[in-house]
Image (tube, rainbow, N blue to C red):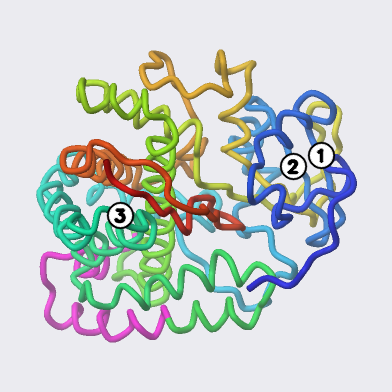
């Protein structure tokens, strides 16, 4: 549980992404800043800039020379021995190798092979609550789907899901303000994967861990344990909370917008554009960059050593880029959203996330075509935004 924080009195000069108003509903804040102070700043978190326009977010994401990815989260402090997670925490030229290695397991063809498994997982989860007539769609449904899918892909027990969720909380939420919790979460993740890496080096299988330990550097030699472990931490953290938050936001929207839900039930062919629109409107992921060289953008001078909160969700609500940006239009035709990031760090697992979100919504609507909210919804704080409690009732 986060400690009470000083309230924000001026979002342009003292913003705080952990403030309850931001956590509950950040969209009006971004709209106001976009019009009055498109690149805001705060002295909190040791100094951070906040661009809210699509073009500014894009320009920063495409400029690794001035904005480094060696730190990708805004925290109260920067732990000196924070473990990296390549490729997301690497800059050119090291970034390219780490990224290229991760692409083959996440191609559309590779993801298609695990889609039946994802559908089976969704239906097993629905089986557990459908007779009750209600459920917490976050706790009992969306939070389990990516956990079980990634466990299947990694070749580790699905039963370890509770541990995965604890590490997600430690690294992406509590760890923002508590270094001890962050480092403990990272260390536990590392020690969890270490014996799996050792075993795959001796007896490789057909899973993602086996795939990574077989990779080699261009100048020879297999990936080091640290490289493999860092990539596994990334796959676990980046592949779980982001997607369950995306799934939860889809369900929240459909629980609060009966017309959209009924359109999707009656016309499932709308699903692809609907999922893209949910990704745009409720993009779960906010990344960060470290300013490493002074530069100017849109009248703002960025000072080295400070951070930039790279809000892809804010960029996705920019009316200069998206007509009716604050409206969710499930048959929106043109939708070049930034939910999966922009530039060289665009999400490697986007095909997996799209598949999981699509399957999760499809299977729920097949079996529970009518549902609505049935209690208070709470949202996560920090790097990833999505419902943490989402009570719904059926019919």
What's the mark number on residue 50?
Answer: 2
Q: First in sequence, mark 2 or 3: give its number.
A: 2
Which is more toward the observer, 233 or 18? 18
- Main secondary-structure element of the magenta-colored stretch: helix
Above or below — where is 273 with respect to 279?
above
Residue in the picture at 52% in, 36% down:
342
How many marks overall? 3
Determine whether, in the image, residue 320 is placed left or right of residue 214. right
- Say which quarter of the image contains residue 51: top right
Is disc 1 placed on a helix, strand or loop? strand
Q: Picture coordinates of residue 91 (x, y %)?
A: 55, 52
Is disc 2 placed on a helix, strand or loop? strand
Spatial CA distance of label 2 from label 3 is 39 Å
Spatial CA distance of label 2 from label 1 is 5 Å
Which is more toward the observer, 93 or 367? 367
- Local packing at callout 2 (Cα closer than 10 Å; few below 14, some 14-19, many 20+) is many
Above or below — where is 368 with respect to 206?
above
- Local packing at callout 3 (Cα closer than 10 Å; few below 14, some 14-19, many 20+) is some
Spatial CA distance of label 3 from label 1 is 42 Å
- Specify start and end residues of the magenta stretch as a single range: 189-217
Residue beneath disc 3: 134
Q: Picture coordinates of residue 220 (x, y %)?
A: 31, 65
Residue beneath disc 1: 40
What's the mark number on residue 280?
Answer: none
Would you say the residues marked 2 and 1 are in contact, meaning their CB atoms lie under 8 Å apart? yes
Check residue 181 for magenta coloring.
no
């Amino acid at each position: 549980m986060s400690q009470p924080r000083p309230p924000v009195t001026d979002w342009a000069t003292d913003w705080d992404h952990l403030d309850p108003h931001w956590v509950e509903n950040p969209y009006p804040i971004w709209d106001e800043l976009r019009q009055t102070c498109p690149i805001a700043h705060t002295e909190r978190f040791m100094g951070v800039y906040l661009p809210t326009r699509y073009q500014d977010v894009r320009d920063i994401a495409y400029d690794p020379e001035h904005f480094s990815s060696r730190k990708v989260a805004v925290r109260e402090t920067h732990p000196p021995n924070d473990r990296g997670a390549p490729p997301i925490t690497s800059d050119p030229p090291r970034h390219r190798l780490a990224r290229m290695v991760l692409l083959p397991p996440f191609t559309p063809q590779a993801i298609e092979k695990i889609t039946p498994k994802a559908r089976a997982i969704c239906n097993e989860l629905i089986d557990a609550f459908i007779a009750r007539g209600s459920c917490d769609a976050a706790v009992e449904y969306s939070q389990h789907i990516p956990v079980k899918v990634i466990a299947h892909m990694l070749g580790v027990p699905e039963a370890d899901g509770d541990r995965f969720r604890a590490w997600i909380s430690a690294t992406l939420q509590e760890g923002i303000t508590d270094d001890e919790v962050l480092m403990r979460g990272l260390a536990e993740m590392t020690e969890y994967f270490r014996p799996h890496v050792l075993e795959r080096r001796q007896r490789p299988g057909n899973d993602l861990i086996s795939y990574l330990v077989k990779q080699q550097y261009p100048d020879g030699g297999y990936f080091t344990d640290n490289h493999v472990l860092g990539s596994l931490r990334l796959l676990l953290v980046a592949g779980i909370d982001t997607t369950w938050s995306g799934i939860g936001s889809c369900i929240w929207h459909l629980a609060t917008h009966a017309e959209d839900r009924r359109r999707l039930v009656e016309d499932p062919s709308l699903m692809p554009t609907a999922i893209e629109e949910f990704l745009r409107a409720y993009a779960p992921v906010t990344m960060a960059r470290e300013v490493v060289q002074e530069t100017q953008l849109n009248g703002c001078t960025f000072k080295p050593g400070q951070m930039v909160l790279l809000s892809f969700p804010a960029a996705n609500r920019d009316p200069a880029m998206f007509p009716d940006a604050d409206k969710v239009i499930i048959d929106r035709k043109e939708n070049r959203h930034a939910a999966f990031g922009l530039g060289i760090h665009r999400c490697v697992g986007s095909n997996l996330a799209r598949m999981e979100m699509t399957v999760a919504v499809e299977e729920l609507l097949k079996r529970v075509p009518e549902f609505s909210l049935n209690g208070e919804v709470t949202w996560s704080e920090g790097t990833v935004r999505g419902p943490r409690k989402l009570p719904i009732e059926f019919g």
